């Protein structure tokens, strides 16, 4: 199959009520352009654990929510969802399905709203995708895939066996920043933070050597990349944070 990974990147901050009150967020458009050049790490991880034998492509939706034409040449398109862009994501999914392209949706938003997502996607994934995606791709190819996939029904992720995200798929546009994950989850349960609550996974640290490995993979694409840690709480474990920083020092300038 030709499998597309479509990210709905960028900043979405256009609450009509706030705009009416004069909250125009000066400078946000410019900042948004910089921020939106950060690719979706979740989709790059999914690509990395896709069974061999498929053609993989990574795409970004534009700031206005429109999708690139090439995505219509895929047999299956995986879309990541955050709440702020979920209606744009559903609109893309509806257009793709109307054109006969099968759509898989996962991510934070559909994990807590699977019924809503089922109105727009052929397949809906709850939780961390690495657990269910390999089996799902095989079942979709065979034609006997159920519509809902719950990660909790598959073995937990072995953080030491996480492959490097497929940064090499980022060839369609130039990126000014690259995401790397050093840990997943957070030990705290703050009421203002959505991520941990939505995925409902424990706090897990990666091997520092694996983080360095991922950074080196990015440096194959760009000699002096701007790296952003896509973590919930990078330095919550102080001792481990120091170990990480010490391992990063020798990478500087080389
Ligand atoms: C990096 C980041 C960004 C980047 C995103 C870049 C991109 N292209 O994706 C930028 C800076 C653009 C960004 C922007 C915003 N962000 Co932000 N961001 C994050 C952060 C820190 C890390 C995301 C990440 O990379 N996670 C790591 C990957 C591996 O996890 P993942 O994406 O969830 O993917 C996994 C699963 O969800 C699942 N999965 C995901 N998609 C799919 C699809 C399929 C088919 C399958 C099978 C599985 C699957 O499998 C993946 C692998 O395990 C999170 C915190 C967090 N923990 O998620 C906040 C977070 C996602 N952001 C948040 C918010 C609020 C925003 C903004 C609304 C801020 C704003 N006011 O504009 C915007 C909106 C983004 C948008 N496009 O609409 C909230 C979202 C809450 C919600 N209800 O959705 C979070 C959770 C922060 C928080 N603690 O509350 N953000």
Image (cartoon, rainbow, N blue to C red):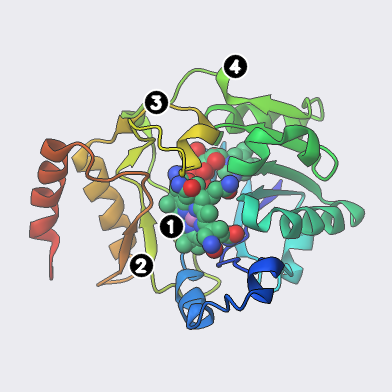
SS class, disc 2: loop
State yes or no: discs 4 and 2 in contact (Cβ < 8 Å): no
Q: Residue at x 50, y 82 (%)?
A: 26
Quickly name the residue at label 2.
Answer: 221
Q: Residues within 10 Å of mark 4 (few under 14, many from 20)?
A: few
Quickly name the residue at label 1.
Answer: 167
Residue mark closest to the camera, 4 vs 3: 3
Q: Which label was assigned to residue 202?
A: 3
Res. 53 in view: no
Percent position (x, y) of residue 206? 28, 36
| Above-or-below relation of 56 to 210 | below
Q: Residue at x 74, y 60 (%)?
A: 88
Q: Which label was assigned to residue 153?
A: 4
Direction from residue 43 to residue 227 in the image, left or right: left
Query: Which is more toward the observer, 68 or 126?
Result: 126
SS class, disc 3: loop
| Above-or-below relation of 88 to 43 | below
Q: Residues within 10 Å of mark 3 (few under 14, many from 20)?
A: few
Q: Residue at x 79, y 33 (%)?
A: 115
Query: Which is more toward the observer, 231 or 130?
Result: 231
Q: Give the mark nearest the N terminus, 2 or 1.
A: 1
């Amino acid at each position: 199959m030709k499998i597309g990974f479509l990210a709905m990147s960028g900043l979405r901050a256009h609450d009509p009520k706030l705009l009416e009150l004069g909250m125009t967020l000066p400078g946000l458009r410019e900042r948004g352009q910089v921020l939106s050049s950060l690719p979706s790490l979740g989709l790059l991880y999914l690509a990395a654990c896709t069974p061999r034998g498929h053609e993989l492509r990574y795409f970004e939706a534009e700031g206005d929510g429109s999708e690139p034409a090439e995505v219509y040449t895929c047999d299956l398109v995986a879309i990541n969802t955050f709440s702020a862009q979920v209606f744009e994501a559903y609109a893309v999914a509806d257009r793709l399905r109307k054109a006969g392209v099968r759509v898989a949706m996962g991510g934070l938003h559909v994990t807590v709203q699977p019924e809503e997502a089922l109105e727009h996607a052929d397949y809906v994934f709850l939780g961390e995708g690495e657990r269910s995606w390999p089996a799902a791709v095989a079942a979709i190819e065979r034609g006997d895939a159920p519509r809902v996939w719950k990660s909790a029904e598959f073995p937990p992720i072995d953080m030491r066996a996480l492959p490097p995200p497929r940064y090499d798929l980022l060839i369609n546009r130039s990126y000014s920043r690259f995401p790397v994950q050093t840990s997943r989850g957070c030990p705290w349960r703050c009421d203002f933070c959505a991520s941990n609550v939505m995925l409902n996974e424990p706090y897990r640290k990666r091997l520092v050597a694996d983080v360095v490995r991922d950074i080196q993979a990015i440096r194959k694409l760009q000699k002096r990349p701007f790296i952003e840690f896509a973590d919930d709480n990078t330095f919550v474990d102080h001792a481990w944070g120091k170990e990480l920083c010490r391992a990063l020092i020798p990478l500087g300038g080389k």
